[in-house]
């Protein structure tokens, strides 16, 4: 009986490789996106999207003084309490899922289109604004970048800037 299950499994696997399902699109799907992870990271091993941001303060002469780019890739420290109550890690996973969706939306965007019209762009801009308000409450301007990083086990091998947002006031 087990052999039939194995054969059925490989038949279903072969059918999924042959038959390509259409991609479902629509603006109403954005309401449900946070419930489903973006599984595109399984399609290609290599570059991973990371979010960087920086803020500026305005001097008396009107000149902007920028801080260095800060890495906003959400990672949390593991501890025993997280086995039972894991809100911070779940929030970090949701934020990284947002960054993955933003990367996928940018990748699917037609050439010459404005990414500021994307819902995921607006959500990432809101996320960046919240983080920068926490870290640098005196900032007057902000900017963020989506970078694709190729990491080895010990270091970042290559970085590619996929998109840099325009400078926006706070």
Image (spheres, rainbow, N blue to C red):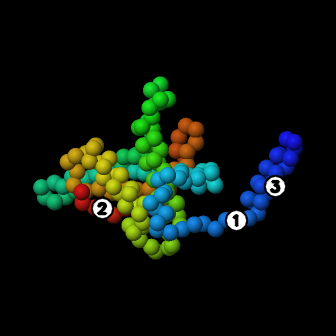
Q: Which mark is residue 11?
A: 3
Q: Nearer the viewer, mark 2 or mark 1?
A: 1
Mark 1, Cα crowd under 10 Å, few <14 / some 14-19 / many 20+, is few
* Quarter of the image with the N terminus in it: top right
Dot 3 or dot 2: first in sequence order is 3
Q: Nearer the viewer, mark 3 or mark 2?
A: 3
Where does the image place residue 26, in percent across and percent down from the top left? Answer: 50, 69
Where does the image place residue 151, in percent across and percent down from the top left? Answer: 55, 45
Residue 164 seen in render: no
Q: Which mark is residue 20?
A: 1
- Say if mark 2 contacts mark 1, CB within 8 Å: no
Identify the residue under disc 2. Answer: 167
Q: Secondary structure at mark 3?
A: helix
Q: Secondary structure at mark 2?
A: loop
Dot 2 or dot 1: first in sequence order is 1
What distance separates the C-alpha of mark 2 from that of mark 1? 41 Å
Where does the image place residue 154, in percent across and percent down from the top left? Answer: 55, 37
Q: Residue at x 12, y 55 (%)?
A: 60
Q: Residue at x 26, y 48 (%)?
A: 133
- In this view, the residue farthest toward the top is 80
Mark 3, Cα crowd under 10 Å, few <14 / some 14-19 / many 20+, is few
- In this view, the residue farthest toward the bottom is 112
């Amino acid at each position: 009986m087990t052999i039939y299950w194995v054969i059925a499994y490989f038949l279903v696997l072969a059918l999924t490789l042959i038959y390509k399902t259409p991609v479902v699109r629509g603006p109403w799907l954005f309401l449900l996106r946070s419930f489903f992870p973006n599984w595109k990271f399984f399609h290609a091993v290599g570059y991973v999207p990371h979010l960087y941001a920086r803020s500026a303060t305005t001097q008396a002469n009107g000149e902007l003084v920028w801080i260095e780019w800060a890495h906003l890739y959400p990672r949390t420290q593991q501890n025993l309490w997280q086995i039972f109550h894991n809100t911070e890690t779940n929030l970090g996973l949701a934020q990284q899922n947002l960054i993955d969706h933003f990367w996928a939306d940018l990748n699917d965007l037609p050439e010459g289109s404005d990414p500021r019209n994307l819902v995921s762009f607006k959500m990432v801009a809101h996320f960046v604004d919240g983080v920068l308000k926490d870290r640098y409450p005196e900032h007057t301007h902000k900017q963020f970048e989506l970078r694709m990083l190729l990491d080895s086990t010990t270091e970042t091998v290559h970085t590619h800037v996929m998109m840099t947002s325009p400078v926006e006031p706070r």
